[in-house]
Amino acid sequence: MKIAILDDYQNVATSLADWGSLVAEVVVFTEPFADADEVVRSLAGFDVLVAMRERTRFPAEVLERLPDLRLLVSTGPANAAIDLTAAHRLGITVCGTRYESHATIEHTWALILGATRNLVVEAESMRAGGWQVSVGEGLHGRTLGILGLGRVGSGVDRPSEWTPSHGVGT
């Protein structure tokens, strides 16, 4: 069996699971593919593909050119880049992993706080031997507009509800 891990640009996937326990050849692709032809050339002969979210597209015309493909796994429960109808027609099983949105929510707040406090400029000044170069603004009394209150948006909306079970404060 041949397994391809796609778009692992950080080259960390092999450290996040016990791939060695599989009786399979596992190949990691860290660079994106240029086009559909390169996808097909590079992935010909693989039985299983592990797609990192929606970075590589799998429309019907690509899936049809990968006759050995039997399983397409996506990191996350859904992947808009996979033509599910074509995969089903071709007998390719498509499934996804669990997804925890806490890291995205926390990163959103880190970006908000970093922008409000001029974090990049202040850190560069400190690294250069300087000191504070601006007066950071606070968030108290400000209004945050959130477009969409799905899993991530509603989490950003309620930081006071973060608990250690959500990965904050542990």
Image (cartoon, rainbow, N blue to C red):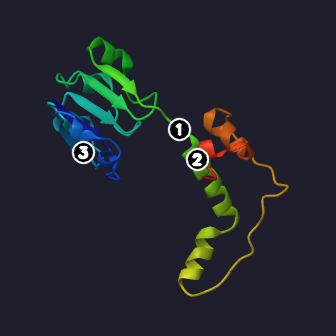
Residue 167: which disc?
A: 2
Estimate the x, y position of residue 58 in percent, counting from the top left.
32, 29
Q: Quadrant of residue 76?
A: top left
120 sits left or right of 29 in the view: right
125 sits left or right of 36 in the view: right
Residue 28: which disc?
A: 3
Judge by depth and name the residue closer to the eye, 35 or 138. Answer: 138
Where's the N terminus, which quadrant?
Answer: top left
Q: Quadrant of residue 137?
A: bottom right
CA–CA distance in space, label 2 to label 1: 10 Å
Q: Residue at x 62, y 57 (%)?
A: 110
Judge by depth and name the residue closer to the eye, 11 or 37. Answer: 11
| Identity, as a three-letter code, of the amino acid under mark 2 | Gly
Q: Residue at x 25, y 45 (%)?
A: 29
Decide: is 77 above or below 159.
above
Q: Could you classify mark 1 by the number of other residues whose Cα lies within 10 Å: few (under 14), some (14-19), or many (20 or more)?
A: few
Q: Residue at x 62, y 75 (%)?
A: 122
Exactly how many numbered labels are in the figure? 3
Q: Quadrant of residue 79?
A: top left
The residue under label 1 is: 100
Q: Which comes sooner in the sequence, label 2 or label 1? A: 1
Decide: is 14 above or below 61.
below
Q: Residue at x 24, y 45 (%)?
A: 28
| Identity, as a three-letter code, of the amino acid under mark 3 | Val
